[in-house]
Amino acid sequence: EPEVTQTPSHQVTQMGQEVILRCVPISNHLYFYWYRQILGQKVEFLVSFYNNEISEKSEIFDDQFSVERPDGSNFTLKIRSTKLEDSAMYFCASIGTRGPYEQYFGPGTRLTVT
Amino acid sequence: QKEVEQNSGPLSVPEGAIASLNCTYSDRGSQSFFWYRQYSGKSPELIMFIYSNGDKEDGRFTAQLNKASQYVSLLIRDSQPSDSATYLCAGGFGGSQGNLIFGKGTKLSVKP
């Protein structure tokens, strides 16, 4: 069964450092998403990406965040200058031609900012 | 402000019983609704989606949607200990309906 993969599984970084979280969506999928989940809290939508551009972003997705699909397979989330409150699990998800009824989540990257 | 509200539980049911999970949503622009299961430390796993008023059944799971009341529910029949997890309700928005607004989740515990 196809799956979304994410690397690394755990990233520890110091406050103020830049991090890049990587995702490989399912190969024929068209829409890509990033969500985050702070420990003990709800899963929050960050950004959606379609046709090589951001289609929607939440209030959380400020200028510190950016997304890119650099090579047609990877989908990355960059946080330019991490803050303590960025510590969370970050999930990548993708949707294929069947639309939202087939949204698959990756296993997540746990980001710890110290 | 788009909101999805769920009772956080925990909800405890005996093995074999019916577990009933509920959620309400605020955004009438949401047309599609999803139930995800999340085990501790894992990613959400899609169980069911529904976009029409009424009931939708899939095996032991039945989703119900009432757009007039802005209410979504999930029934799990013949609950098993392996169903113990947090159940997340989500509403879709955006052109693809794939941008999901999640509730906080209801923690379900099925006792053998």
Image: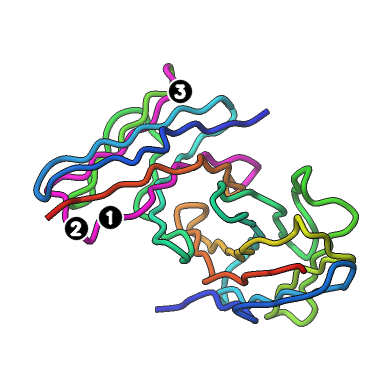
Q: Is A35 on the left or on the right of B11, as rendered? A: right
Mark sitting on residue A105: none
Tag 2 near tag 3, CB within 8 Å: no
B109 or B6, nearer to the observer: B109
Q: Is A86 on the left or on the right of B77, as rendered? A: right
Q: CA distance from mark 1 to mark 2?
A: 6 Å
B26 or A69, nearer to the observer: B26
Amino acid type, residue under disc 3 in the picture: Gln
Residue found at x 68% / y 80%: A73
Q: Secondary structure at mark 3?
A: loop
Q: Secondary structure at mark 2?
A: helix
Q: Looking at the figure, which quarter contains the C terminus of chain A?
A: bottom right
Tag 1 near tag 2, CB within 8 Å: yes
Q: Give residue B90's position: percent from left, percent from top.
A: 49, 42
Amino acid type, residue under disc 1 in the picture: Ser
**Residue, disc 1:** B84
Span highlighted in magenta in the image: B69-96
Q: Give residue B101's position: percent from left, percent from top.
A: 58, 42
Q: Give residue B92's position: percent from left, percent from top.
A: 55, 42
The residue most toward the top is B68
* A90 shown above or below B76: below
**Residue, disc 2:** B81
Residue B24 in which image quadrant: top left
